[in-house]
Image (spheres, rainbow, N blue to C red):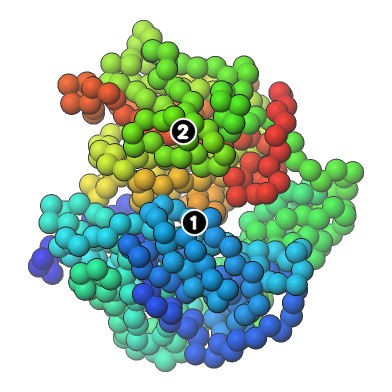
């Protein structure tokens, strides 16, 4: 593959998504990952408090192994914590953090300090893909980047087959001028200059190189946002940091340590309010002692538990009562069990049951409301002013074809049904580089248009978890936060909370929570796809706090409350 061709592929990948926001699609180390700082010193300075796992996300290929470690914070050079209780949702992990896959799929590795069951755990994501022995090339992204000394940059590596198809792969990372972990996270050293990051494919040995420039600019200050927030007991808010450099530029890639009073805060900055009302602080501290703080006001309450408005985990073998269905033929939306399911279907994300949505290109009006193929199951739940949490898991089967036009699978939508939904979750090969999940927002009520505000490459054949936190509004007072596979997404504007959002149609008095398959007509004709296309869902919930909707939570409630 020529350099010119590889450059064209890189530019095509960067056309729609900023390099700093590209999702991690492949990264790993065949052995022990490179230290995130040469000054790391193992030890447990305290038996209390959270830990930060490393690597945060990693893709393994075949039987490739990786070593996980725990540190006191995300700041490079923080002390390693060695007394860790390790667990994993798939594969095996030893007491020293060494992880070995046993099957393909998407899994979680959880680490918690030993000695106190109240210590907050941290979670990393592992995606295991099959071996790729027939690669034509691999490409690193970003391929040329500037990273200030002591700050960080996430690198990813993608494999290309001879026909140009992209595939997820496992690589070994090496670097000069700084350090790089097993997940491709590079930490710049303090000496300015031009350096290299190299990814080498573990199966074929193919490699690619990116260029890193470390400037003389240094971090001058950090700003913590939001600067103030008011929360009810048990609710939460994501905090983030921006850094100002000595050359006047700003960056969001500043590793910090978070501390808080009045509640708990994760190593990545998610604060959960405690049960006692009052005024408290969140503090972020970067290397060199540069810090900023925010104010948290917790309102008094006699209850800290969230309520569940809707649960569809299918463990009864059916949908919850009062669910409304739109399907051209009975059975297009069908609940399956682990012991009775079609070929190519997964096992349940959790428990024994899940649901499949099968749609043919002929599933159109008059048996559905539109001229585009559609099947939908929904409940009317939301009203203007509601602040709600939603969670669900989706599975895109292996071998799923490229989707050239729109394909929506979740929306919050209601009357007057006169424009696209203000927010939706979709899949599409919109840039010619492979199918991606994406989210729409920035709804313009006058023009009735939306914009793509986040996207990530789809790994097929594994369950993916979405958690959505939003304020419903018919004006610009709404906002949106999203977590994908346990990690909060960063939107195209660089924020983790998309504000100034109209999240309901103008004039709407309610909106539905809908899981669906709604796609552009003509993409998959019955002559070529006589059995249609199927996607699968599980663990769908709507509630008032994150802990009652997030599938990774151990506090999921089972009750259903009608609004």
Q: Secondary structure at mark 1?
A: loop
- Residue 31: give x, y in percent of width and height: 39, 78
As measured in the structure, the alpha-carbon distance from the residue carrying label 1 to the one carrying label 2 is 20 Å
For the point 71% across and 24% down, the residue is 563
- Residue 217: give x, y in percent of width and height: 46, 84
- Residue 93: give x, y in percent of width and height: 52, 67
Depth check: give the residue in front, 97 or 452: 97
The residue singled out by tag 2 in the image is 339
For the point 50% across and 22% down, the residue is 377
For the point 40% across and 20% down, the residue is 332
- Residue 95: give x, y in percent of width and height: 58, 73
For the point 42% across and 92% down, the residue is 191
Depth check: give the residue in front, 350 or 147: 350
The tag earlier along the polypeptide, 1 or 2, is 1
Question: Badge 2: few (under 14), some or many (20 or more) residues near its Cα, within 10 Å?
Answer: few
Q: Does the image show residue 550?
A: yes
Which of label 1 and label 2 is nearer to you?
Answer: 2
Location of residue 266 with respect to 218 vertically, above or below: above
The residue singled out by tag 1 in the image is 90
Question: Badge 1: few (under 14), some or many (20 or more) residues near its Cα, within 10 Å?
Answer: many
Q: Secondary structure at mark 2?
A: loop
């Amino acid at each position: 593959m020529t350099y010119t061709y590889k450059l064209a592929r890189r530019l095509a990948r960067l056309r729609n998504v900023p390099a700093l926001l590209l999702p991690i699609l492949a990264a790993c180390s065949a052995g022990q990952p490179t230290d995130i700082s040469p000054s790391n010193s193992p030890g447990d300075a305290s038996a209390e408090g959270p830990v930060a796992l490393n690597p945060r996300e990693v893709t393994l290929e075949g039987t490739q192994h990786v070593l996980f470690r725990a540190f006191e914070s995300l700041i490079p050079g923080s002390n390693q914590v060695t007394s860790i209780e390790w667990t994993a949702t798939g594969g095996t992990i030893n007491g020293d953090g060494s992880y070995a896959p046993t099957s393909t799929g998407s899994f979680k590795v959880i680490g918690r300090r030993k000695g106190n069951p109240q210590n907050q755990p941290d979670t990393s994501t592992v995606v295991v893909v099959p071996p790729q022995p027939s690669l034509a090339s691999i490409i690193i992204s970003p391929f040329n980047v500037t990273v200030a000394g002591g700050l960080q940059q996430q690198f990813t590596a993608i494999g290309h087959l001879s026909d140009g198809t992209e595939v997820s792969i496992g690589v070994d990372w090496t670097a000069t001028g700084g350090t790089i972990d097993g997940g491709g996270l590079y930490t710049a050293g303090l000496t300015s200059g031009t350096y290299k990051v190299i990814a080498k494919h573990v199966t074929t040995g193919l490699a690619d190189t990116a260029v890193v420039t470390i400037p003389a600019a240094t971090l001058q200050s950090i700003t913590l946002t939001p600067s103030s927030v008011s929360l009810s007991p048990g609710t939460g808010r994501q905090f983030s940091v921006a850094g100002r450099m000595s050359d006047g530029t700003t960056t969001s890639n500043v590793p910090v340590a978070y501390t808080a009073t009045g509640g708990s805060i994760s190593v990545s900055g998610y604060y959960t309010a405690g049960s006692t009302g009052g005024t408290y602080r969140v503090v972020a501290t970067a290397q060199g002692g540069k810090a900023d703080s925010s104010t948290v006001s917790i309102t008094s309450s006699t209850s800290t538990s969230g309520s569940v408005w809707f649960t569809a985990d299918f463990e009864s073998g059916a949908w919850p009562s009062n669910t409304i269905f739109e399907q051209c033929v009975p059975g297009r939306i069908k609940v399956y069990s682990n012991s009775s399911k079609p070929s190519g279907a997964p096992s349940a994300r959790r428990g024994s049951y899940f649901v499949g949505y099968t749609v043919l290109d002929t599933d159109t009006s008059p048996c559905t409301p539109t001229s585009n193929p559609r099947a939908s199951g929904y409940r009317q739940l939301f009203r203007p002013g509601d602040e709600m949490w939603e969670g669900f898991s989706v599975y895109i089967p292996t071998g799923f074809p490229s989707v050239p036009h729109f394909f929506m699978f979740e929306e919050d939508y209601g009357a007057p049904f006169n424009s696209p939904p203000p927010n939706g979750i979709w899949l599409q090969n919109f840039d010619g580089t492979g199918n991606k999940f994406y989210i729409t927002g920035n709804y313009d009520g006058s023009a009735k248009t939306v914009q793509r505000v986040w996207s990530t490459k789809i790994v097929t054949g594994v369950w993916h978890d979405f958690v959505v936190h939003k304020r419903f509004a018919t004006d610009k007072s709404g906002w949106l936060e999203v977590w994908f596979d346990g990690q909060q997404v960063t939107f195209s504007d660089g924020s983790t909370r998309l504000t100034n959002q109209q999240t309901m149609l103008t004039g709407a008095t309610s909106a539905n929570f809908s899981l669906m398959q709604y796609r552009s007509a003509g993409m998959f004709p019955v002559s070529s796809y006589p059995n249609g296309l199927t996607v699968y869902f599980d663990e769908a919930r709507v509630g008032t706090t994150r802990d009652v909707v997030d599938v990774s939570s151990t506090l999921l409630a089972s009750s259903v409350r009608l609004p």
